[in-house]
Image (cartoon, grey):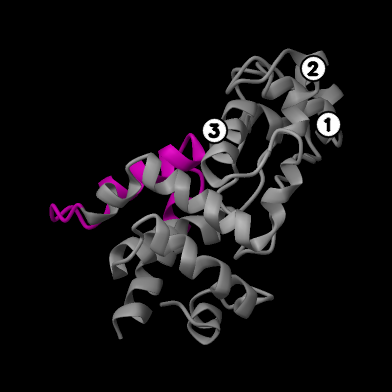
């Protein structure tokens, strides 16, 4: 079981460790995140995604076209094509997430409506629908429910189990965790953004839990 004190120790920037501990424990228990290595993997990934449980809505405000080209090279082949989306997160979300993960076209507004939320950054209309059905709330009508600790934790734990991440966390093939942790990161992030930081956080959390 994670306590407020242990959560504050492993994620020192977390502003409300007691509230998050109360939300995380039943969610992790429900979805089998119940061994030190599973818990450490889950907390490292969700902690990184959410800025240690402080940022529960995806920030899509980018200040330079160069950054947009780097993040979405297929969407923005040139800096000129990215200029209209600088400092305009609604326009950006509706464009980069259009016709993907269950979203409609740019004009549907789905990209912004179903942008990343929660501690695992649930993104896309189809994911909101699936997870909402699984945890018993209408996330399509009320996507901001994922910004509450209870549902943020529950949705993340459901996603984690449903995508086979407990099994990846369990894999002890002697690869120094990198191969499996990379696979976990790709399933959550879609790429390997922040991989080194995620892995370092995992090892730090694991040492704390085992100590």
Q: Secondary structure at mark 3?
A: helix
Magenta stretch: residue 187 in it? yes
The mark nearer the N terminus, 1 or 2, is: 1
191 in the magenta segment: yes
Q: Disc 3 versus disc 2: distance between alpha carbons?
A: 19 Å
User: In this orientation, does residue 92 appear?
Assistant: yes
Of the 4 image quadrants, the one containing the N terminus is bottom left
| Residue at x-position 35% and y-position 68% | 203
From the viewer's perspective, tell me whether residue 147 is left or right of residue 39.
Answer: right
Q: Which residue is mark 1?
A: 90
Residue under pointer 3? 130
Report the magenta residues as a range: 171-197
| Of residues 48 and 129, the one drawn nearer to the viewer in this rendering | 129
Which residue of the protein is positioned furthest toward the left in this rendering?
Answer: 173
Residue 125 position, x and y percent, is: 64, 27
Q: Position of residue 120 (x, y in %)?
A: 55, 49
Where 49 sits versus 84, above or below?
Answer: below
Q: Residue at x 68, y 64 (%)?
A: 54
> For residue 108, which numbered disc appears in the image?
2
């Amino acid at each position: 079981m994670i306590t407020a004190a242990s959560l504050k120790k492993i994620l020192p920037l977390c502003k409300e460790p007691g509230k998050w501990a109360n939300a995380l424990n039943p969610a992790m228990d429900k979805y089998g995140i119940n061994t030190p290595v599973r818990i450490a993997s889950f907390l490292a990934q969700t902690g990184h995604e959410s800025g240690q449980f402080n940022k529960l809505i995806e920030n899509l405000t980018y200040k330079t076209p160069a950054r947009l080209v780097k993040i979405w090279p297929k969407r923005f082949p040139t800096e000129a094509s990215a200029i209209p989306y600088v400092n305009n997160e609604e326009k950006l979300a509706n464009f980069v997430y259009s016709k993907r993960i269950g979203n409609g076209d740019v004009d549907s507004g789905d990209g912004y409506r179903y942008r990343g939320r929660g501690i695992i950054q649930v993104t896309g209309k189809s994911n909101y629908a699936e997870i909402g059905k699984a945890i018993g709330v209408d996330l399509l009508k009320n996507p901001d429910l994922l910004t509450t600790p209870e549902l943020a934790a529950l949705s993340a734990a459901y996603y984690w189990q449903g995508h086979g991440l407990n099994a990846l966390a369990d894999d002890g093939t002697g690869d120094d965790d990198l191969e499996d942790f990379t696979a976990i990161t790709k399933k959550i992030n879609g790429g390997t953004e922040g991989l080194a930081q995620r892995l370092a956080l995992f090892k730090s959390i694991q040492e704390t839990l085992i100590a």
